[in-house]
Image (tube, helix red, strand yellow):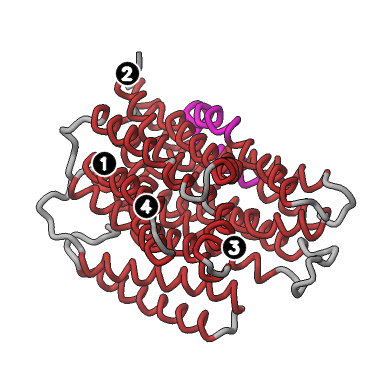
Amino acid sequence: MFNRESLIIISVCLGAFISCLDSYIVNISLPDIATAFGTDVVSVSAVTVYYSLLMSCTMLVWGKASDRLGARRLFLAGYAVFTLSSLLCGLAPNLEILVLSRCLQGFGAASLFAIGMTIVALHMPQNILGKAYGLVATSGALGLTFGAPLGGLITGLFNWRGVFLVNVPIGILAWLLTRHSIPKAEEKNEEGKPFDVMGALLSAAALFSLVWALSACEREGWQSFGFLCFFTLALALGILFVFQERRHPSPLINPALFTDRGFPLAVGVGMILMLALGGVALILPFHLIWGKGLSVEMAGLIMAMFSSVGVMLNHLSGRLADKVGAARLCLAAMVLTAGSSLFFAFSAQAPGLTTTIIFLLVFGVGCSLFFPGGNALIMKLAPREHKGAAGGVNATSRTLGMTMGASIFAALLPHHGATGQLPPDAMRLPWLFGAAILAVAFLMCLPLVTDERRKRREQERSMVA
């Protein structure tokens, strides 16, 4: 009924779905977890913080290791780790074991997130990459859309343990499907080369320090000791990482990835869009609840409209990217997201919800235009022997962008104390910043369109010849 290519896509889509689902499904159960273990909000927040930390810090390692050991093998390992750790989370007898299990779960989710794109790039024909990535993006959007409602339903019907245990049957099914569908005879482009252990340690430590610094910034502000200390440490470790990569014979991030200027440009555009998405995820709920006086339930439904756009359009935009060119869709995406951000900066204070809904829908359409084509473009531009490392770089940049965006947008909100109210113009400065960085991303897309047009002309000439 399904050919091998379809089964591979389903396997990768399941990974995108459960990794995105688990980022949201757990959050709504945190009050129940805190009650069950008799702890406070700060302590129980470690359940989500450490999951994100381990994901951010290990994606590069998973991506590089897949070039050396094989993407299929490590994708299977990622499913196994994620499924086992989900079971451990569901059975955790105390908060400490739950947090440790969540760390392990984040480690497994990093594999699914980073290597899934590599699997698609290695096993799908070039002419349907956009369609394939559109399906993967749709699966991730489904996970984000149904995370909170499903988490609330499972917690209400059973208890908080159910939000972890639901991953177990899905993970087992996905592992069996992956094992059956992905060919065993796959390329191991860096087999036999020394693994960059020091680079892996330095990158993980630098990313950990950066994410921790951003977390401290959210809690304590830009001038806090925690932020300054960890940011300085991240900067120092990052410099050491660069020196390590320049001298290692098989670096974690190979300079060959950046031979084509389009690769860093496309990755950078995606990271900027994720910065803005971090702002949407963090400050829009405050705008709806504190600024517009909505209930939590109603605010959640309105936010779900945003990810629902992706569910409806990602697949279509993936097909469109294959026909008209991924770079053109990326350019159109930046026009829509930058324009909607500028519109919202000056209209958010208007009475009612009309302007907010317009902003979320238009911004959502822009994101749906970018992600399928953007992912396809990034993986096309990466050399075949470094697809794994490219997937790791792309996934890491997206996660970091989301984290950095949340911190920056929170810092740009005007002072509001703990009154449960926002000033009328609270959205102006954050979304003027959002419009500015997305305008920069628009300019970064112009060379991508030029290069794509040139390559298409070269292909047409070679076909005629």
Query: Is there CB contact under 8 Å for labels 1 and 4?
Result: no
Q: Classify residue 417 as left or right of residue 206.
A: right
User: How far apart are labels 3 and 2 at the CA level?
Assistant: 41 Å
Badge 1 marks a residue whose secondary structure is helix
CA gap, disc 4 to disc 2? 27 Å
Q: Residue at x 69, y 47 (%)?
A: 300
Say the numbered circle drawn on residue 3. Answer: 2
Disc 3 to disc 1, C-alpha distance:
32 Å
Choose top left, top right, bottom left or bottom right for residue 461. Answer: top left
Q: Is residue 41 left or right of residue 114?
A: right
> Residue 406 got which mark?
3
Residue furthest bottom in the image? 225
Residue type at mark 1: give it.
Leu
Viewer-side residue, 343 vs 206: 206
For the point 37% across and 52% down, the residue is 110
Bounds of the magenta segment: 311-335
Q: Is there a contact, CB below 8 Å, between mark 3 and mark 2?
A: no
Based on the picture, tell me whether residue 416 belongs to the magenta stretch: no
Residues at marks 2 and 1, CA–CA distance in whole angstroms = 20 Å
Q: Residue at x 52, y 52 (%)?
A: 26
Q: Is residue 421 visible?
A: yes
Between discs 3 and 2, the one toward the N terminus: 2
Residue 121 rendering spot, x and y as whole percentages: 33, 37
The percent coordinates of residue 157 (x first, y second) are 57, 41
Left or right side of 95 for 409:
right
Quarter in which the C terminus is drawn: top left
The percent position of residue 169, horizontal first and vertical second, equals 37, 36
Identified by mark 2, the residue type is Asn
Pointer 4 residue: 110
Q: Return the mark for residue 76.
A: 1
Of the pair 449 and 3, the residue shown nearer to us: 3
